[in-house]
Amino acid sequence: MLAPGVRIVRGPDWCWNNQDGGEGNVGTVCEIGKSGTVGSPDKTVVVQWDNGTRTNYRVGYLGKYDLRVIDNAQIGVKHPNIKCDGCSCQGIAGMRFKCLACADYDLCHACYHAGRHDVSHPFRRFDSASARGVDLPARRDARQANLKGIFVGATVVRGFNWEWNDQDGGEGKMGKVLDIRGWDNESSRSVANVAWFSGSTNVYRLGHKGNCDVKCVEGSQGGLYYPEHLPVLGQGADSTAQAERTVRTGPPPFNVGDKVQVTVQVDRLKHVQQGHGGWNPRMAEYIGKVGTVHRVTDKGDIRVQYEGCNNRWTFNPVVLHKVNTIAVGDVISVITDAEKVKELQKGHGEWIEIMRDSLGKLGKVLKIYQDGDLRVQLDGHAWTLNPQCVRLIPGSAAELANTMHASQNQRQEPSIQWQPSNNPGDGPANGAADQLVRAAAQGHLDAVERLLEAVRGEAVDARSGGKTALQVASHQGHSPIVRLLLRAGASVNASDNDGDTCLHYAAFGNQPGVLDLLIKSGSELNTANRSGCTALHIAAHKQPARCVQILLGAFADPNRTDLYGDTALHDAIGKDSYQVIEMLCAAAGTDFTLRNKRGFNVLHHAALKGKNFATRKLLGQARQLVDVKKDDGFAALHLAALNGHRDVVETLVRHGQADIDLRNNRNQSALLLAVSQGHCGVIELLVKLKANINAKDEDEDTALHLVLIKRSHMNGDIRQEENPEIFSIYEKLVDVPEHRLALSIACYLVQSGIDLDALNSKGQSALGLLQESQLQELLKSYKPLVENNRTSEDNTLGVENLSLNEARNATDGYNLTNSAPKSSPIRIVEEKGTRRSRREHKTDKTLEMGGTSQENSPNHHLYQNEILPAGGQNEQQRNQSNKPVECLVCSDLSEENVKLEPCGHKPACEDCVSRMKKCLQCGQVVQKRVTKDGRVIPAKSRQPSAERMRYLECKIAEIEESHACSICMERKRNVVFLCGHGTCSKCADTLKTCHMCRKTITKKIPIY
């Protein structure tokens, strides 16, 4: 229970007056103390009180316990199969209280402290699902106190961990808590839903992963509680951990969602089912079939759901086995224990030393062999791996890892703490050191001079609280004292217990004058502390940015990385420090391609955090990064869309010319990711920018499938200024009882031309996901009405009254993916019954593949003239009088080439200009390509498409398997065994059994 996120109140050894705001005020454990840490040592915790106070407290330090736990649901504690008999809530979150006088009677923590049930009955408290329980006395005579803090109705402002820009309306703006809820299925009561007085509403962390985004300016009442009936934080932690380790021995339990299979015969199943759900003859039909764990009962039995079966069968867990669910194309990560991988690889492809570089990295499954071994693409190599060496990365986990809420994407600003030693047992030397350091910190020049005269030699670097006088003077910016200490021989590169040198201290204090002085005195510029941070990393967090300017001017390395793999530019982007970003982007030698340990380069990081200024600067310096993907296939556009950063999405597409339909490893486009999270502003923007509205993910779900599948979990923002069309639909659906936001998005997608009849991999249409017929009709009512004007070579009467302008306007506003350009009347007159020439089929195919439009070709004029009405003769004559222009690259003729901006020249056609980076006529860099009808042509990369890459990867893997040694993958296969498998001669020398089929090798035959 000693974990970040736990909600606490003052405990039995409290002696800190009203730091917490008074008895009953609630706080959150944010950090757990560690040995050797100055600010928060072992057996202490850092607490963020709801009133904004933040400091550390004892949880066993010197045998004292300052805190009690009021709620631990925030760290994911849950009793999934226990129902609260007070409020009828299924699955008690947090502590459970069981009545010892009544049979099978349980209360959640809220009902227990509210006095539900007979208060004369004793209870047993269970702090977790695996806890043994603690007996409590009756509540009749127990003391009660009032809870106060961030509860429903509290008035709050932004707090310590705030990183959401100006969602609240700006610093100091207030909001009111509407409710306290959980963070998806990870935890309960760990986020607060806040309505800001500025108008917006959103959820903010209140204990989730130990973070607190808000603090209260006016707390609200949270009910009564029994202080003496709460667990003491830190008390019995060691014994509890030992008990949990004892309980958890043996095979791992089944979890909800696991794929399982009955692997015993009928007779055995009948026998073991007694007392475990019983036997039904129909259960025999499901032996050997794969089902999904639906629930784990109180007794530990497993309830399994089979596809196509209305019943759920309860099985004894001894008859079930987990089924390997890894499939070709899945993203996996290799476990990091090298020794374990070596052992597991014996007889499964074996181990070679170069595989060490792939430990912990993401890869993709290329093939699954009959014996279950995996062929995995990892870091440019293809390895044969034991499936026990890898861990499946599910799609939801991959998406979570690319959100701002992921724990690995949270960073704390570097800081230092110092207090002078107050130990009366310190000797005279240490007392003199304390005086010297204190005088240096307080800026008393005369006192420092006097003390330096009293000490000799190395005593000038004596420490107090682990810090030297020069370090604290540097931090405080006392330049005269710094000069004095340097003249006295103080070490400029001395480091404290955390590895921070004087240069770090000057950067922490944002003291540019002292920083310059230390550099000129020989301070090492690129020394890293124990967190891997150089002075440049620390200065990147500070404003104004004069320290960064000085460090870069002294040629500090901007590419040094900390323990997270972040450069100073990563840190500056996270802090949204405009000046620092500009300086680092302009610095000589800055490597924009460096990735941190989470796989993010600086553009990925800016897109993740929603930093539009940084995104623009980075695109100006390194636009080649715009479509670069992480290992999981997420590019900057995916990250911005997934996290709802509309302005960054617009910058990436318009300014960076990102591929709007780029796919990640799960075949998701930016539009699909935005729809999955309900980001209305991003959805509407991407549709208007001509994203493929009918794109499908790896499960062949369209955006409409996704929004209907996730409709019960969708709670995004909807703002009229950012998404006027969805907002308009939302206002009309006032009578819809639930899922109003999701249905508004679905109606907008239908209105924008999405295919209602598209089927996913399960053969389901989007409408088939809705059970209510009235909702199906609601979506159908938004389907755009396009007039059916049919034409054929035999009968052209159907278009007799259709003018060219009408043909152009009929489909304006619809995002039809497989269609001709808006200016072409073919979009209206072509239907399934229309005969088309081979040239027209070629045109459609070219458009679908993202190539050039042929609407201005001579052949197209002939077709257009055949279907023009009599009233369009003048328009026809004007078209014929237009002289076609030649593309300077491919020499094709068209009515007008594409205009380049800012130079205004028109050198090439659509297809050629999309790959042009500079104008052929003036040499100026191309920023935008605009057609005559106002369309912006995106830049095309010379990199092959994702589909082409997958095809090539498979072909390469096949070639490798047929020619290369399957063990080392480096040398040619030139030795075969009688079983038919083979290796290179070097690898074959040490083999006694075949690495593929495990048969004993009796003969090794060289081949030439």
Image (cartoon, grey):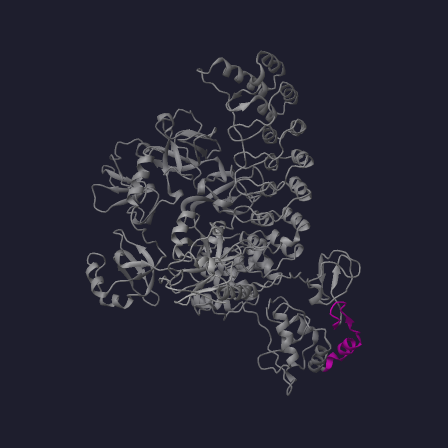
Task: Tell me if residue 877 is in the magenta stretch.
Answer: yes
Q: Nearer the viewer, residue 503 or 24?
A: 503
- Tell me if I can see residue 230 in this picture: no
In the image, is 691 to the left or to the right of 883?
A: left
Q: Is residue 889 above or below residue 178?
A: below
Is 479 within the magenta?
A: no
Using the image as rendered, state which of residue 637 and residue 822 is in the foreground.
637
When the figure is inspected, residue 86 is found, relative to residue 322, above or below; the finding is above
Q: Residue at x 35, y 62 (%)?
A: 1000
In the image: residue 798, left or right of residue 377: right
In this rendering, is residue 483 above or below 86? Answer: above
Image mark count: 0
Q: Quadrant of residue 504?
A: top right
Q: Which residues are magenta?
A: 870-893
Which one is nearer the viewer's eye here, 595 or 185?
595
Left or right of 766: which side holds 571? right
Q: Position of residue 856 (x, y in %)?
A: 72, 73
Q: On the image, which quarter does residue 461 sit in?
A: top right
Q: Nearer the viewer, residue 838 or 152?
A: 838
Where residue 314 sits in the image (x, y, percent)?
27, 59
- Image coordinates for residue 920, horizontal then vertical, percent: 77, 61
Residue 249 locus on image (x, y percent):
29, 46
Outermost residue on the bottom side: it is 794
Q: Is residue 627 visible?
A: yes
Q: Quadrant of the N terminus?
A: top left
What residue sits 39% from the left and 31% below the top? Answer: 43
